[in-house]
Amino acid sequence: MKTYLPPKFIVERDTERCIQCQACVSQCSFDVHSYDSEEDDVISQGDNCVGCHRCAVFCPSGAITIKRNPLQYNENYNWQPEVIEDIKKQAETGGVLLVGMGNDKQYRIYWDHLVLNASQVTNPSIDPLREPMELTTYLGCKPDKLDIGPDSKLQTELPPQIKLEVPIIFAAMSYGAISLNVQKSLARAATEMGTLWNTGEGGLHPTLYKYGPNTIVQVASGRFGVHAEYLDAARAVEIKIGQGAKPGIGGHLPGEKVSDEVSVTRMIPNGTDALSPAPQHDIYSIEDLSQLIYALKEATNYSKPISVKIAAVHNSAAIASGMVRAGADIIVLDGLRGATGAAPKIIRDNVGIPIEMALASADNRLRQEGIRNRASIVVSGGIRNSGDVVKAIALGADAVYIGAAALVALGCTVCQQCHTGKCSWGICTSDLRLSKRINPDIGASRLANLLRGWSLEIKDILGGMGINALESLRGNRLQLRGIDLTDTELQTLGVRMAGS
Ligand code: SF4
Ligand code: SF4
């Protein structure tokens, strides 16, 4: 069928600069560049270009320029180019439009409307280069009170806790959705930096068991790769109910991405689609959730925290309360801008609520009900830098998950083609030729550097506020002020207007 879609990008190759090395031909996984042996020339034409920039980065002579196609539709606020193009694609395929990464629509990013405080005359700031700054975070249920014995020793038996050296965890990304080399990079970086990575719902590859003490394993609706050794190996177990990129629906890993190794790890036949049902078929109430939480606690001998992850939706504060009462030690809220390997575009772009609102209202509700100590809150979905981390903690989070930011550190350019399995950066693919592009040693070092850089910045921000321990900032909304927000927004966030 004739496609009525103009190319999105124009790829220009400067023939004066080009040395005909064909690096672009081998680097592009979307067939933009080819070698014409008859003409002995490299041909570049942008029809298939997705704007991943791999060729331009690897061109040794800087000969490639990628530009957005200036071809304009008629001005029309209602019929924007994306709307027109989506309709054309569906007229060709008759199917659901799939897309990767997170929501790219212009919903308000509240992090950018919140500003942090800094000490000036009173409560002087602290110089993090000269004085100790504490970022250590403990995740897990905390008791209502602590009993100290006459020998000054703690008498209360604490529920299992996880010690994080930095309040940043690598988000759930499953083997199959991302390559094994990316998972190795995440696992090694988490181990080096004293934090955690998360298997997602794809099981745990045998080569990654040694990273168990820094691993969160997921139990999702498909139960892929879940068995006793998998649960035993982990530092924590996460029940996945929902995710921010596709609230209310299940997951789908296309059969083409289910390679031999993925199939063994997921415990499903090779080449079959891995479909996770929308609901967990044994959870229809908070009581059912409680049963699964306690089944997992029982299965792991009450030795590790059980986390429950939901997508941030309209009533997530009430759901969070139910999750805590059901026995969750950690609750995870994944917001509207959470990324994914593949989601129906219509769901990704229209369902869910911003994480800032979900976090503020859940933290508030748990405090009002006097149960905030019974679970840690971890948030994800659009954390882009250390400023977002600090604001999330001031809004009430104990720690954050980062997914897309970690992938960007590995080379991702947010081209949103993860669902195609052709990621030219070797990240979201099970094609061995592509996945070799990630060297786990280099990947781990880049990820560790990212966490190191953010940690230094967090210490700088804390020092500026005159705070020497992250613990003292948690839920301290007085350190935040809102800019360009309505009274209702300020009220939901629980912060005051700048200047007040
Ligand atoms: S990578 Fe650059 S120099 Fe090499 S063939 Fe392509 S455009 Fe030419
Ligand atoms: S992971 Fe790969 S395919 Fe996905 S957005 Fe990043 S560069 Fe594109």
Image (spheres, rainbow, N blue to C red):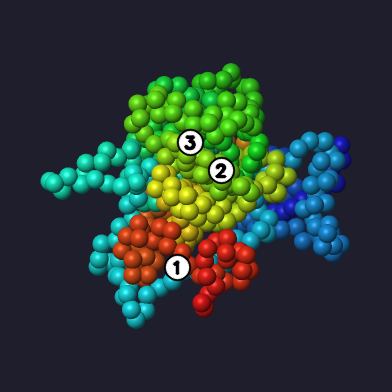
Label 3, secondary structure: give it. loop
Q: Does residue 417 appear anywhere in the picture?
A: no
Could you classify mark 3 by the number of other residues whose Cα lies within 10 Å: few (under 14), some (14-19), or many (20 or more)?
some
Q: Amino acid at mark 3?
A: Ala
Label of residue 326 in the image = 3
Assess mark 1: CB under 8 A from ligand 2? Answer: no
Label 2, secondary structure: give it. helix
Could you classify mark 2 by the number of other residues whose Cα lies within 10 Å: few (under 14), some (14-19), or many (20 or more)?
some
Image position of 28 with respect to 390: above or below: above
Q: 407 or 287: which is nearer to us?
A: 287
Label of residue 478 in the image = 1
Viewer-nearest of discs 3 and 1: 3
Sequence order check: which comes first, mark 2 or mark 3?
2
Percent position (x, y) of residue 345? 71, 44
Residue 334 shown left or right of residue 91 in the figure: left
Q: Amino acid at mark 1?
A: Leu
Q: Are marks 3 and 1 in contact (CB under 8 Å)?
A: no
Who's the residue at 65% across and 38% down the image?
248
Who's the residue at 46% across and 53% down the image?
367
Q: 43 or 448: which is nearer to us?
A: 448
Sequence order check: which comes first, mark 1 or mark 2?
2
Percent position (x, y) of residue 86? 79, 47
- Give the CA distance from mark 2 to mark 3: 10 Å
